[in-house]
Amino acid sequence: MDGLAGLTANGITLAVVPYLRAAGIEKGSCHLFRHAMATQMLENGADLRWIQAMLGHRSVESTQIYTQVSIKALQAVHGSTHPAEQRENNKPEVADEK
């Protein structure tokens, strides 16, 4: 693979698949890398339109599949923004009465 000529979806797949197979990963291709990159960028605050442009999607609907964020990310947002969580985290400590 030399220069931009190898930076096609098929060119990268042809370069990566032998390494995946050698590592014992039978299913997978460059699509997994694209999906992981886009999901991580979105979870870290990248705008969906930037991700759309990077992936070369004509329609934002194609990019919206990456909006399925991880449970861990959802729990973190919930814990830091939900009013009930805010009250729970800001409760004054009560001394034990004996």
Image (spheres, grey):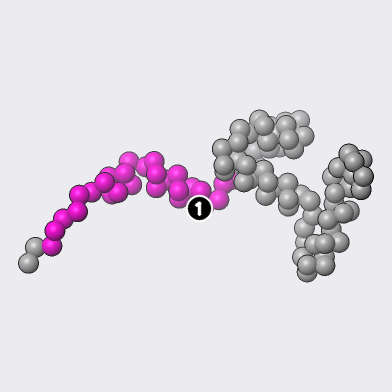
Residue at 30 percent across and 49 percent down: it is: 89
User: As drawn, is 36 to the left or to the right of 91?
Assistant: right
Tell me how many marks there are: 1
User: As drawn, is 75 to the left or to the right of 12?
Assistant: left
Magenta highlight: main SS: helix
Residue at 92 percent across and 45 percent down: it is: 2
User: As drawn, is 43 to the left or to the right of 62?
Assistant: left
Question: From where the camera sits, is residue 44 visible?
Answer: yes
Q: In terms of depth relative to the viewer, which is nearer, 74 or 15?
A: 15
Specify the segment rendered in magenta: 68-96
Instruction: Say which quadrant the C terminus sits in.
Output: bottom left
Q: What is the x, y in percent for residue 11? A: 89, 47
Say which quarter of the image contains residue 82.
top left
Q: What is the x, y in percent for residue 81? A: 39, 41
Taking 48 as reference, is 20 above or below it? below
Taking 36 as reference, is 58 above or below it? above
Taking 81 as reference, is 50 above or below it? above
Q: What element carries label 1?
A: helix
**Does the magenta segment cover residue 51?**
no
Residue at 61 percent across and 33 percent down: it is: 47
**Does the magenta segment cover residue 80?**
yes
Q: What residue type is labelled 1?
A: Lys
* Mark 1 lies on residue: 72
Question: From where the camera sits, is residue 61 visible?
Answer: no
Q: In terms of depth relative to the viewer, which is nearer, 92 or 61?
A: 92
10 Å neighbourhood of mark 1: few (<14), some, or many (≥20)? few
Residue that protrudes farthest toward the front in the picture: 3
User: As drawn, is 52 to the left or to the right of 82?
Assistant: right
Residue that protrudes farthest toward the left in the picture: 98
Q: What is the x, y in percent for residue 36? A: 67, 49
